[in-house]
Amino acid sequence: MRLVGLTGGIASGKSTVSNLFRDSGVPVVDADVIARDVVQKGTRGWKKIVKAFGNDILLESGEINRALLGQIVFSDPSKRQLLNRLLAPHISYSIVWEIAKLWMKGCKVIILDIPLLFETKMDRWTNPIIVLWVDPKVQIERLISRDGCSEGQAQNRINAQLALDWKKSEADIVIDNSGSLDDTKQQFQEVLMKVSEPLTWKERLRSRDGLISVVVFTAVGVLLAQKNLL
Ligand SMILES: CC(C)(COP(=O)(O)OP(=O)(O)OC[C@H]1O[C@@H](n2cnc3c(N)ncnc32)[C@H](O)[C@@H]1O)[C@@H](O)C(=O)NCCC(=O)NCCS
Ligand SMILES: Nc1ncnc2c1ncn2[C@@H]1O[C@H](COP(=O)(O)OP(=O)(O)OP(=O)(O)O)[C@@H](O)[C@H]1O
């Protein structure tokens, strides 16, 4: 099994590219979706947030007020670290569970779309790592236009993550998403070919079918050895 890391900065185009992977039939585990699931009303993540941030963090429906929580944590690093500490175990557990389900289905290549891949050191699990890079001016413009936030709020969100240029320097594959969608789609075709290359023998051993083959060969080997000994 090949675990491909897909990361970048906020609004650098991860979801755009992970949708291209999905459309090409490659399964994607999306950490942002998981991070939403683990704080659904009544979950353990939700209870932890209410305990730490108080009832004022809830909407009338009882759901977390994400806009308010975002305002708090993106303007106060200590609150953000607190939130990260509270949710990290739930998010990583769910990511592992999603990978396990895809492994059991026999999937050979899985994309892990994780915005904080480097920050959470999950990059150790993934190879290759794709970084979505975008020109800083374009990034802030897209963030403001998508989220309708002020320039200051957008900059706070960008500053809450490791520098995108540093992430780029750590990447195995870089997609420059500063241009048009067509330009990104063109780069994507090459990346798709790369991540779809035949698995290495280590990756094959880590896949479901590889493991089954090892178990079957070992069992046959043991049986033959026993027969020869008798
Ligand atoms: C702060 C919250 C409530 C804001 O919610 P909101 O709906 O406005 O944003 P959303 O969840 O869609 O995240 C948008 C982007 O913000 C960035 N981001 C999210 N959380 C963080 C964080 N703790 N630190 C840095 N950047 C973050 C990511 O690039 C993400 O793609 C939410 O992001 C959250 O619960 N974050 C903590 C969970 C987490 O670490 N998520 C990232 C998954 S690895
Ligand atoms: N090449 C492009 N040209 C124009 N707009 C783009 C391009 N790529 C992405 N966008 C737009 O920029 C915004 C950010 O893209 P996207 O949501 O894919 O980023 P992201 O990295 O997943 O963001 P986040 O970190 O918040 O999850 C979206 O509104 C998207 O439609």
Image (tube, grey):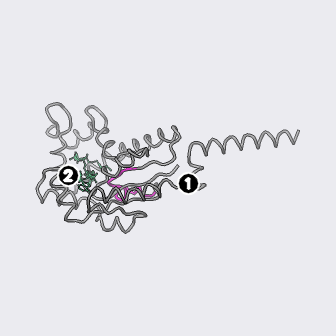
Question: Along the line of sight, which residue is nearer the eye, 172 or 36?
Answer: 172
Determine whether the residue tagged by mark 2 lies in a helix, strand or loop: helix
The kind of residue on which mark 2 rests is: Val
Q: Which mark is residue 198?
A: 1
Q: Residue at x 28, y 38 (%)?
A: 39
Q: CA distance from mark 1 to mark 2?
A: 42 Å
Left or right of 150 in this view: 203: right
Residue drawn at the location 34% of the way across and 55% of the way down: 185
Residue 58: percent from the left, percent from the top?
A: 17, 37
- Which residue shows up at 40% across the image and 50% down it? 112
Residue 114 is inside the magenta segment: yes
Q: Where residue 215 sits in the image (x, y, percent)?
A: 67, 42
Near-viewer residue (189 or 210): 189
Asked if residue 82 is among those painted magenta in the image, a careful observer would answer no
- Quadrant hosting residue 222: top right
* 73, above or below 176, in the image: above
Return the disc, 1 or 2, that comes first in the chain's sequence.
2
The percent coordinates of residue 31 (x first, y second) are: 34, 46
Give the residue number, with chain letter if any, for mark 2. 73
**Residues rendered magenta in the picture:** 112-124
Q: Quadrant of the C terminus?
A: top right
Residue 7 picture location, percent across and down = 35, 56
Q: Secondary structure at mark 1?
A: loop
* Label 1: how many Cα within 10 Å (few below 14, some 14–19, many 20+): few
Amino acid type of the residue tagged 1 in the rendering:
Pro
Q: Which mark is residue 56?
A: none
Under 8 Å from ligand 1: the CB of mark 2? yes
Please, what is the dominant secondary structure of the magenta stretch? loop
Task: Tell how many labels.
Answer: 2
